[in-house]
Amino acid sequence: MALVACGAIAQPCAEVVERRGWPVDVVPLPPLLHNHPQRIAGEVERLALTLRERYDAVAVGYADCGTYGALDEVCDRLGLVRLAGLHCYDVFGGAERLRTMLERQPGTYVLTDFLVRSFDRTVIAELGLDRYPELRDDYFAHYTRMVWLAQEPDGELHRLAARAADRVGLPLTVVPTGHGGLERALADVLAATAA
């Protein structure tokens, strides 16, 4: 089986697959597709069709991820199963927990371990804040805090998360999540794909 995975979660997906001994090859798409979510469904479809030539089954390691149903349309048409939820934050932190967190403080900017590691590239550089720091308020004026859903927190990631929050002027809250949610979500997807 092949898992078409978002590049932002491909590494933890591969770690779960290896630890569980699942016969799955994780095939990532570029994580920067999240900056262009209108392209995700088409890229997933293209890769899934290619992988079907070599694998008996293909699953999708994406939540909706800002496609507003376009990914579901591809999955329905091709008979693919994807991760549940609106985004990987639901997968890592739990959909109900995220919904409650965002209802209580709508101005919450959420990070995963991947985003903590890549913040300078995926956020600062991609938004042009490295060249035009005055745009900070245009992008972040309505945010009130940054929440890091910490899957594997260590000293270095804590330092990087604090630096990311400081770069955009937000207080940081750390919410330990581990990989349990991802592991359960993957197990559900793989079981549904194999059925």
Image: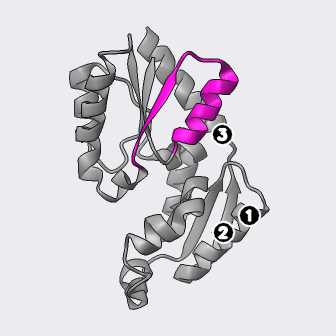
Q: Earlier in the sequence, mark 2 or mark 3?
A: 2
Q: Residue furthest bottom?
A: 134
Disc nearer the start of the sequence (3/1): 1
Which kind of residue does numbered mark 1 sit on? Glu
- Residue 10 location (% of width, % of height): 51, 39
Image coordinates of residue 95 in percent, x first then y, are 52, 44
Q: Position of residue 92 (x, y in %)?
A: 58, 44
* Displayed quadrant of residue 183: top right
Q: Residues within 10 Å of mark 3 (few under 14, many from 20)?
A: some
Instruction: Count neighbours of disc 2 (C-alpha within 10 A) and say few if under 14, some if 14 to 19, many if 20 or more.
Output: some
Amino acid at the residue labelled 2 = Leu
Residue tagged 3:
179
Residue type at the position of mark 3: His
Q: Residue 67 placed where, x, y %? A: 28, 47
Which structural element holds mark 3?
loop
Q: Nearer the viewer, residue 99 or 17?
A: 17
Give me the disc on residue 160.
2
